[in-house]
Amino acid sequence: MKKRNLWIITALMTIALLGVFVMQLFYIRESYSLKLQLFDQDVNQVLASVVNNIQKRNVVKHFDERDRVSQREHTSRIRSQTDSIVAFKVRFKENEAIRKYKQQQQLVDYLNFQDSAIRANYFSPTIISEETYRAFTNPNPGSNGLKYEVKDIKDSNGNLVDRRIITNIASIRRLPGINNLPDTIRYIAINPSNYLPYTVSLASKDPELVRKFKVEDAKAERKYQMELERLYADTLNIYETTSYNLVQDVAKELQNKDVPLENRVPSKDDLDTLIRKELLSRNINLPYSFWLTPSKNQDKIIYRNAVNKNDELLPKNTYQKVVFGNDIAIADPGMLYLSFPSKNSLILSNMFVTLASSASLLLILIFIFTYTIMSIVRQKKLSEMKNDFINNMTHEFKTPVATIMIASEALKDPDIIGDKNRVNRLANVIYDENVRLGNHIEQVLNAARADRKEIKFDVKPVKINELIAAVVDSMSLQLQKRDTQLTLHLDAITDELEGDELHLSNVIYNLIDNAIKYSVNEPKITIETASSFSHINIKITDEGIGMTREQTKRIFDQFYRVPTGNLHNVKGFGLGLNYVQDIITQMHGKIKVNSEKDKGTTFEIILPI
């Protein structure tokens, strides 16, 4: 990725993050403002409710006092008036029973008259039920229907005296009571004109009589209601007169300007209870202060209940309400004040979820942003280091290969084949370059195995002092070539630990080799060992070119090589120190580096015994 594209991505992500941050701040600010408004509204409602209760208690107090006096006065009058109403209702019930009896007698007379008329105009009229009437008028298919026989009754001269009908229909012997009559009474009789069965329907109630009865009932009810209303009016007049007098007396007492304010309001404890109850009903559980003063002399405090003795009542957290604002006759309605010293704590606690979610979201976004940018930068640096590694590896491999090729071609020369010294020298060159090439390959393979955690340790007791001495001895030619001044202080008393001798040797070798490479003049190297109860410390110090603080942070990164300025003889792949760190870490140890530019570097290895 190009550097310009990286800066564009960083800028866009920064703008997006800032936008989210600003939106969260705006949302939190609006939420805080809304919570503050709701709190103010709840507190004002609390004050209104408390003042309303104070006014009610003041009125109820006076009413209770006057009611006890007036209750005894009108009890006797109410009792006598009630007796009159009861007696009137009893008389009405008696008159109503007589009227209903007379109405029933008129209905009976009407039915008898109609029944006589039917029997005079038809032969053998018989009363039937409604079910029989429906079966006769609407016979079902397949039914036997009505079966009847006409029987003539004649005198001794053969003259027809009467004609009767005998049917298979069961007649009703007796009608039900007058109050249970059906709307229509059904008869079956012989029609004189054709001597066939014929049904006659008779209304059980005469419409004229019904209208007449309704008029009579309405008049009686109206008269009853009028008289009852009069009696109730007299009773109500007693109540109203008593209540009116009670209200007048209470009103006079309430409008008495000489009654002090402290006599109109409840006690301090009752007032505190009212306020606390109203606050808790609105989920406000905060320490509060309240005080009650006259409206005209607010320096005089009637009641005061502060959170503490030195409580400073802040105006911005104080709410006030007129106690008797609706009672214009009172000269001093009084003022009730309510203060919350820690109002913001409640609002912030109610916003805890909002603040926590916003903070968590911002932290997550910042983490993702940072991680993304660091990953991009790390990948970019890793890509650059890999390119440098490939270029360096190509150069390192190309040099021995070219040397081997030249030596091989020289061996083909017939003049050289006869010279054994030159052949031996060329053979040694080929061997050395092969060894050098093999070391390069082994170094790359070791780094790859360490990166994949595939290194297998041959763990056995290793004496660190002897191991360091052996590595130094094996590097004697390399040390002599650079005129290296090597100083050993192998002072570790307990120098034996469990580890892999080969990989520990490679660790010491790489550190000494780096000390030689990064020394401008004759290298000066000091190797020290020390032991404690549980660890062995190994320090390798040189007086080379040193490193800056930023370089020491990256010294163990894979493919990273410290820039050497004008020094061009430093060779390598940038894998040695990464390999050293992996070996020490897998052996449960630690490695530290302390370096100063142009003054040298110290590597300290700490291994558990």
Image (spheres, helix red, strand yellow):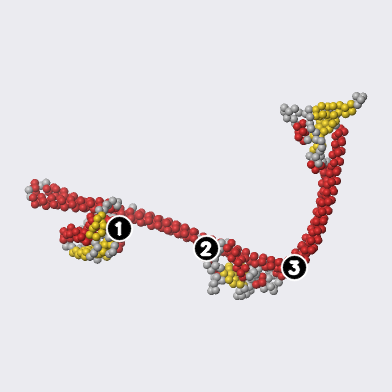
Q: Position of residue 203 (x, y in %)?
A: 81, 38
Amino acid type of the residue that numbered disc 2 sits on in the rendered structure:
Ile
Type of amino acid under label 1: His
Report x, y in % for residue 22: 46, 59
- Quarter of the image where one finds residue 225: bottom right
Query: Which residue position holds label 2?
Result: 347
Residue pictured at 21% horizontal, 59% vertical = 467
Q: Is residue 115 left or right of residue 565?
A: right
**Quick one: which residue is furthest to the right in this view?**
157
Q: Residue at x 85, y 30 (%)?
A: 123
**Which disc number belongs to residue 588?**
1
Q: Earlier in the sequence, mark 3 or mark 1?
A: 3
The x, y position of residue 286, in whole percent, is 54, 66
Image: 589 above or below 107: below
State how far apart marks 1 and 2 are (Cα): 52 Å
Residue assigned mark 3? 69
Q: CA distance from mark 2 to mark 3?
A: 52 Å
